[in-house]
Image (spheres, coloured by chain):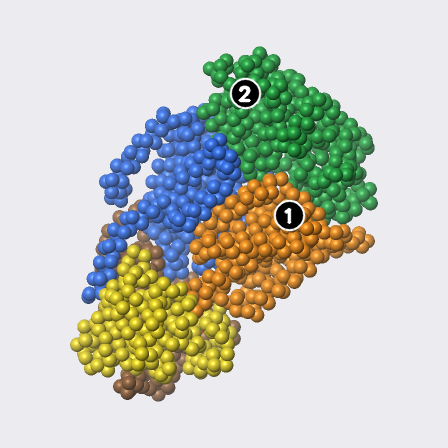
Amino acid sequence: MGEILIETKDIGISFGGHKAVNKVNVKLEKGKLTTILGPNGAGKTTLFNLISGLLEPTEGQVFFKGTDVTHLSPLKRIKMGMGRSFQLTNVFGALTAFENVRLAMQSKENIGFKIFTDHRKYKDLNKKTDEILEKVLLKDKKDFLASELSHGEQRKLELGMVMALDPEILLLDEPTAGMAIEEVPVMIDIMRNIQNSGTTIILIEHKMDMVKALSDKLIIIVNGMFLTEGDPETVSKDPEVLKAYLGGGVLDELAVKG
Amino acid sequence: MILKKDLSKNMMIFLGLLLAALLILPHVSTLSTTTLFSRIFIMAIYAMSYDILRGYMGFINLGHALFFGSGAYIVGILFNNIGNTFPMFMLAIVITLVYSSVAAFIMGKIVFRSKGGGAASVVAGAMTTLALGEIVRHTAERWRDVTMGADGLSFRIPPIFSDRTMFYYYALVFLIVMTLVLRQFINSPTGRVLMSIRENEQRAEFLGFDTEKYKLIGLQVAGIASGFSGVMFGVLNRFVNTELLTVQQTLNALLMTLVGGTGTLYGAIIGSGFVNIVQSQLLNFRSVHPIFERWLLFFGAMYVIVVIFMPKGFMGLYYSITDKRKAKIKNHAIKQTAEK
Amino acid sequence: MDIFVTLAINGLAQGALLFLLASGLSIILGLMGVVNFTHGTLFIWGGYVYIWIFGLTGSFVLGLLGAVVVAFAMGVFFEKFFVSRVYGNVPAQILITLGLQVIFTELVRVIWGATPLSIGRPAFLAGAWDISGVVIVHYRVFLIAIGLVIAVGIHLLLNKTKIGMIVRAGVQRPDMVRALGININTYFTLVFAGGAALAGLAGALYAPLVGSMTSTAGMHNQVLAFIVVVVGGMGSFIGSAGGSVILGLMGSGVAWFAPGLATVANVGLMAIVLAFKPSGLFGLAVKK
Amino acid sequence: MSSLLKVDNLESYIGLFTILHDVNLEINKGEAVALLGRNGAGKTTFLKTLMNLVDTRSGSIELNGKSLVGVPTHKIAKMGIGYVPEDYGVFDALTIEENLKVAMWKEDKETLERLDYILELFPDLKIAYKRMAKTLSGGQRQMLSISRALVNKNQILLIDEPSKGLAPVVIEKLAHALKEISQNTTVLLVEQNFAMACAVADKFFIISEGKTVESGNIKDLMQDKELQNKHLGVV
Amino acid sequence: GDEENTEEGPIKIGGITSLSGALQDYGEQMQRGFELGLEYATDGTMEIDGRPIEVLWEDTATEPEVARERALILLEEENVDILVGPASSADAGAMLSLAEEFETILMIEPAAADSLTGADWNRYLFRTGRNSAQDARAMAEIITNANPDAKVATLAPDSAFGQSMVAPFEVALEEMGGELVIQEFPPAETTDFSSYILRIREEAPDYAYVIWAGANNPWGELMEHNLEDYGIEITTGAPEIAALRMMDPLVGMTGFTVYYHSVPDNEVNDWLVDRHQEEYDMPPDIFTSGGMASAIAIVTAIEENGGSMDTDELIEVMRGMEFESPTGTRYFRSEDHQAIQPLFEIELTEEDGVDHPVPVHRRTIDGEDIAPPINVPDGAPR
Ligand SMILES: Nc1ncnc2c1ncn2[C@@H]1O[C@H](COP(=O)(O)OP(=O)(O)OP(=O)(O)O)[C@@H](O)[C@H]1O
Ligand SMILES: Nc1ncnc2c1ncn2[C@@H]1O[C@H](COP(=O)(O)OP(=O)(O)OP(=O)(O)O)[C@@H](O)[C@H]1O
Ligand SMILES: [Mg+2]
Ligand SMILES: [Mg+2]
């Protein structure tokens, strides 16, 4: 096994009586693309929230690069090199697409609290922003307010923002939900490139084609508990996984029958 | 300066003419008009400081008057108790700077404790600041030996300020300088982060911005600007009472920014001009027709009309014209994406 | 000892008055999320209409009824033509309602003059019991009773019918509520007007308590209502009731033990509550 | 079969932007129709225009021969349209139960039976029945949103990307259910998941650049790789 | 005080007071009184030595900044010779420096804060109205007159107004041999006075001096707590008629008043009552009387100055000048320009056909006996 970037130890959280995540132990390797799979409500997003610090666990610990970050604020974890996207689209509605990405870039460049220099002076920042918008297919819409974008376009913007952040490890929560099928290959490309540039990606995704094409490892979570893990091929044939998550692939049959 | 890039040629000419007009104004108008304009300039800064909070940070501060009123008190108390000299004025500026930033820091620490968006938290913030503002007002009211409470503190000012025409120019310079400074602040990286916080604080935090710090800075800058305008207001009026610390005083700022257009900075200047001139005109109309003895009816109607017919204020009207041009380009872009 | 009993009873009665004052706002601010600065105006209109009708008819009940009806009608007018345009936009709400407040307060002066009008309590509610030094004023007991009736009534109305949930849903996603086939505008109008009517009732009940009504009484009472709602917890009607009682008792206590703090006690409490529990004292307890 | 929904030369706009330029389509009673197209093509805007959540500039929309243009949204809904918006439109501050209650027009036996059926379909909702909707996971929100549209007896369902965020098993179940529902209720489905679309719909329309550009039988589209490529990019 | 204006054209008086806002009522009364006062003092001609008098009214809206701005318009654009008003002490405070700057007399009426003719005094300020200290001394005088070593409690709102009424009272009372045993300051908006009243009851003073202006008042509660049974006598200054209407429970009380239309007995007042009744169909009120007094003072001064409007001369003339008023003769004390005037001891009685307790004259308190201390700053230019 390669270097472990993130490790959870018996991490868990309960809301009232409900254990959304229950003693989960995962090790996320550097440089690998790991996909977390599980039925709706399994606790995937909650696990992300625990790792990224949006929620504090009721039990267990999170380690990031060997440091115990369990009680660190999200901000500190981000500064340490963690980045995440959100399942429900979460962009700055009244700012332009460009500004959305530029802000992420600004944060990454760590310009700090400059209160009397003009933001437009940072030319290379603007250039890099344009590049990213081009990558996520939003070049033409850079002057649109984020709220004027269609849902799929907002998902792309969201992706652009985390790319600009260029973190060491990237937690992506269903980045392609609602994206046009035609663009899935582009997204796969983008993610491959990110990965190749040395970023570790952790993905939550329901699109199996994409998952199989990209993942080095799958982790299956059901009912808040770790079920199994392994390489995509093996895991996607696991009968338990089929039952709990994948179903029988009847969709295609249905379609054929009409 | 980037100013050049931002302004079209027509705009530059317009601003040049406006400045020229303002420069000769005192020589062609009555003293009371000159004073009205001094007041407009000073209130414009107060309103701009409010717009930083409201328009750029999305934070409704119902205690904002505490900075403004305190600035006026600081200068008044110094003049009254130590001496009405220019050095005391400078001292007042320094004390106001320190006081405002400390007060803003404390206010921020209390108000920004609870994070998150939603109408409920906007209201919670508004009510917390209202409470803080009221506490300051009550403190001033109780500290009667020094502040004279609601009856007010009248004081003498240094001779250098006593010429109204000269003071008009000071106020104008003050306005121009503060506008440039605040503008620069809005355009700074920090200013941009504030806008992102307004849109979605949680997201800003997950982009790696320490949102609380940024908000504190924003509040401090606004507080200081407001405090400075309070100092100038005190010198203009040579009088200060607890009225300057009331919620009503804060709401005046809100009104001015809304009339001018929130989140536009310059809107506050237009708003200050409009509101102050309307109020003064309505009082002038008393002698025209007795119905204007009930001028408050019209003043109230102005609030309502502005919100209904000019929800984005005067600057909003202006932008909607430029927007139409932009819209064309965007419509084009919609097609282009679709074609790909 | 008798002093403390007197203070406790007065505190409760004060709580009842605060509750009446805040109940309308609790609905409008808490449920609809509208920062309504016309509350104070509706309150004084209630008081003036009561005095006017009471003067004409001599009937306490007709006076109250008149106040409620007029305030309700004003509420419909405010909501339909003004407030309905600014849902979700707090600053615009503040300004538009403030404008209406200025206009309608000035109208009070035009109609009834700026001079405070005095008004006595109806004969059957005048007077007090003095039980060995403990003074219990009839009218205050009456206020407690009315407060209870209103609290229970509105609570049932909001919880046993769909009104409460529809309005809460409509505040968050008016478009979606409409897309479910509900005419949310009518709900908003009725609920706003209902809140307005309660403000009017509060004004009508307040006038006989303090013995007069004046056009300047609105602003202070309005701020007080805001404080009650925020301290109790926005969005929780019962929270407002709890907040009222706490503020009422605190008022008595502070006035006795630390009268120097009386002027800031309410806002001070609000600041503390908001700083440590922004959802208000009863914000969570009630809404599980 | 009689036409249920008929749209002609529809043009609609948001603020200063014209989004739909020329949309034409006709749906008959009892059909299940998929509306396809790339991101930003105008699918969502079309559904919103039907609900009068987006303004129509010109053209006509008729449901059972009655024009919908300019009719208030709530009245349109009451004509028997169930709507599942793209962003779920869940009421966060209400419980699951309340979300469903708000949606119900009446609480008669039939409605309650439908409710049982729904909760059977999405057991997740049943478990979380008394919980605030803001605590739901992404997929559960989608389930709730769909359920809300199903509790009433509708003539037509407008569903914007139902498969988004749902696990494959659930998509499967949903597809079955929609297929079943489409026996009695007309379904208009916006989908990016082609398999799902094919599983549910009989007919399709493709929107591009705010215009309807293709239509036909979905089986033909399944065969016609070229057409798929041109408008959907499916490989 | 513009020189060019002195001999030709009308005499311009700027009336600036609260015609809207919180003190609108006071302002309007004063306005009426002032106009009637001019009529009286000029025998209906509205002229002095053949020069017509023109009064320009401005509304302060009861806001100091507005007051200042409107005053500036009067002074600068209208070139008024003299300013009169306002109702609110804060409005007055904001205008003080303008009087000095424009070297124009500001005749303060009815704003009552002591500082206006005290710490903040300048040579252009005159006040026809009484100040808080005069009220305080009248009250102290009445109490000690009845009970030379009375123990007294005060109940006043926790505001500039309340404090400024109690502070001079304490001084005056002590000076006259009484003792102020407890001071209660409920917030101005209080609707539940019980704690404060109970504390007073515990202290068992001989008198409770209640100072209250405002709609929510303690009268009812004071009665409910039966202070009389505990040997505590309630006393206060009888206010304007609107406020008297709320004082039904206090019938029988002894106190003082500045003015009530049936209290003073002199021909100015007789004229005022008749004329006011004729014009407005109601009796004049406190601030009407004040307004009239200020008008008479101004006319008297100009006449004594031979019709000249020269400010310095007027100031000289007015120092020590006696003038008539509806409450009797007053004079401007030359040290601080405060009008020294009589106040009245009264008793509230019920009267048929009147909707409020009527103050009945018991005794006139000589102005000299209640002259307030002089607090003009030492170095102030005279
Ligand atoms: N605050 C909360 N209170 C109670 N339950 C919660 C809360 N937050 C989440 N849950 C529950 O915890 C479970 C896990 O939710 P989570 O969002 O992690 O699911 P998920 O695996 O991301 O699902 P999906 O694929 O649908 O997004 C769900 O059943 C959800 O309803
Ligand atoms: N509020 C708005 N203001 C301006 N333009 C908008 C607005 N909403 C959407 N648009 C534009 O309208 C076009 C169509 O958007 P729509 O949401 O209907 O697309 P869609 O087909 O549903 O796409 P997706 O598959 O991404 O959901 C897009 O180009 C978008 O930029
Ligand atoms: Mg999830
Ligand atoms: Mg869409």
Q: How many marks?
A: 2
Could you say where residue B193 lies in the image, as x and y percent from the top left? 36, 53
Residue B272 vertical position relative to residue E92 in the rendered view, above or below? below
Q: Which residue is at a point 43% across and 38% down the rendered structure image?
A: B278
On the image, the x and y values in percent for residue C47 come to 62, 49
Report crowding for label 2: few under 14, some 14 to 19, many 20 or more residues within 10 A (C-alpha): some
**Chain holding disc 2:** E
What number is the disc on residue D33? none
In percent of width and height, residue B135 lies at 56, 46
- Closer-to-camera residue (B227/C214): C214
Quadrant holding the N terminus of chain A: bottom left
Does residue D49 appear left or right of residue D110 in this picture? left
Q: Which lettered chain is shown in green? A: E
Would you identify the image quadrant in which residue D137 lies? bottom left
Cβ of mark 2 under 8 A from ligand 2: no
Instruction: Check the rendered structure and report the hue given to chain D.
Output: yellow
